[in-house]
Image (spheres, helix red, strand yellow):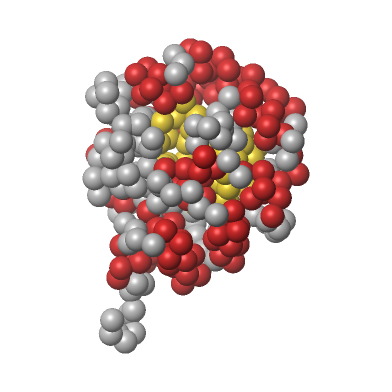
């Protein structure tokens, strides 16, 4: 039988990945309240916001204000997404508000060009400078590689190419590498082989950067892919409450894996997360109320499994 990890870490990315990709601009006070609900539910890693140009992403223009309004418990890590050197400069003005940054690029040239208007080589050079500065500031760094499992424009993405990018990011100071299935193209068999290869190449002998899986549920395969990653010993995931979010390009690339769907499954499998599922569902219901429309998460519809048989 497959040996699954006993415990996994989950980074909640809804406040950034989710709020950025929903059409509405959520009020600052609502964002703060929702993040407080996530903290109360036991989430220990939260991607709070991003420092991007407000004319490009008005949804996150209040990032500094959100960070300044939150009380961060000692055992909770806040991260912010930083697109480039300019973004880091702006982020560092609120240096006290967060502990980690994430940087990102795509493993496919076309997706990277459409998303950030740079070649992969240009992105890597810029991010190496960002990571050097962030490291000198004592910030923990995660490098996220989008379209790691397939590209909507180019199709197949070679794992060898993803590995080269991961190695560059690790050498530049990333303590964690995230692999994003940005437009929901991965399948469990592919994920199994992918993480077998990445683990042996990036963590020989169990040492090396933390490897994190970031699946999207665009085609309903996010949870199946998470099981495949677990089976290869991956114990760090990113997910989004309510199944918020997606990717800005191409349009229609909706839906991160819902955190509550992932947490429910993990708990049913006897895998600890430290997260209180009822508390998390309260946060997801609250964000659904704020947006005023039903969200994609299954648990929001069905509720947690009741083994005592109290009826639905
Ligand atoms: Zn995502």
Q: Position of residue 117 (x, y in %)?
A: 44, 18
Give the answer, above or below, for where 283 lies relative to 241: below
Q: Position of residue 273 (x, y in %)?
A: 50, 60
Question: Does residue 195 show up?
Answer: no
Question: Does residue 302 show up?
Answer: yes
Q: Residue at x 56, y 14 (%)?
A: 125
- Give the image quarter of residue 70: bottom right
Q: Nearer the viewer, residue 246 or 2?
A: 246
Q: Nearer the viewer, residue 80 or 136?
A: 80
Specify whether 54 is left or right of 304.
right
Q: Residue at x 37, y 53 (%)?
A: 243
Q: Nearer the viewer, residue 198 or 139?
A: 139
Specify whether 79 is left or right of 295.
right
| Quarter that holds the N terminus | bottom left
* Label tally: 0
Q: Nearer the viewer, residue 64 or 276?
A: 64
Q: Position of residue 255 (x, y in %)?
A: 34, 47
Q: Position of residue 33 (x, y in %)?
A: 58, 62
Q: Residue at x 30, y 36 (%)?
A: 251
Task: Find the residue positioned furthest to the front.
Answer: 55
| Quarter that holds the C terminus | bottom left
Specify whether 167 is left or right of 131.
left
Q: Residue at x 27, y 28 (%)?
A: 152
Give the answer, above or below, for where 31 lies relative to 166: below
């Amino acid at each position: 039988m497959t040996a699954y990890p006993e415990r996994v870490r989950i980074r909640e990315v809804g406040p950034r990945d989710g709020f950025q990709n929903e059409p509405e601009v959520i009020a600052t006070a609502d964002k703060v309240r929702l993040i407080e609900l996530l903290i109360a539910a036991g989430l220990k890693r939260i991607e709070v916001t991003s420092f991007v140009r407000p004319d490009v992403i008005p949804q996150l223009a209040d990032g500094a204000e959100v960070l300044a309004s939150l009380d961060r418990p000692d055992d909770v890590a806040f991260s912010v997404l930083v697109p480039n050197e300019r973004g880091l400069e702006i982020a560092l003005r609120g240096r006290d508000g967060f502990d980690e940054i994430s940087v990102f690029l795509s493993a496919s040239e076309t997706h990277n060009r459409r998303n950030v208007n740079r070649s992969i080589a240009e992105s890597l050079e810029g991010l190496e400078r960002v990571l050097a500065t962030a490291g000198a500031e004592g910030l923990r760094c995660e490098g996220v590689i989008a379209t790691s499992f397939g590209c909507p424009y180019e199709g197949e993405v070679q794992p060898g190419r993803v590995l080269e990018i991961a190695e560059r990011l690790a050498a530049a100071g990333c303590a964690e590498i995230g692999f994003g299935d940005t437009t929901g193209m991965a399948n469990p068999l592919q994920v199994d082989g992918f993480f077998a290869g990445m683990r042996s190449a990036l963590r020989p002998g169990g040492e090396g950067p933390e490897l994190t899986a970031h699946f999207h549920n665009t085609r309903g395969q996010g949870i199946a892919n998470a099981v495949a990653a677990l089976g290869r010993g991956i114990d760090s995931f990113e997910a989004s409450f309510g199944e918020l979010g997606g990717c800005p390009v191409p349009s229609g690339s909706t839906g991160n894996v819902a955190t509550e769907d992932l947490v429910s499954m993990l708990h049913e499998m006897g895998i600890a997360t430290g997260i209180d599922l009822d508390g998390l569902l309260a946060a997801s219901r609250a964000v659904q109320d704020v947006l005023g429309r039903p969200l994609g998460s299954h648990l929001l519809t069905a509720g947690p499994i009741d083994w005592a048989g109290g009826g639905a």
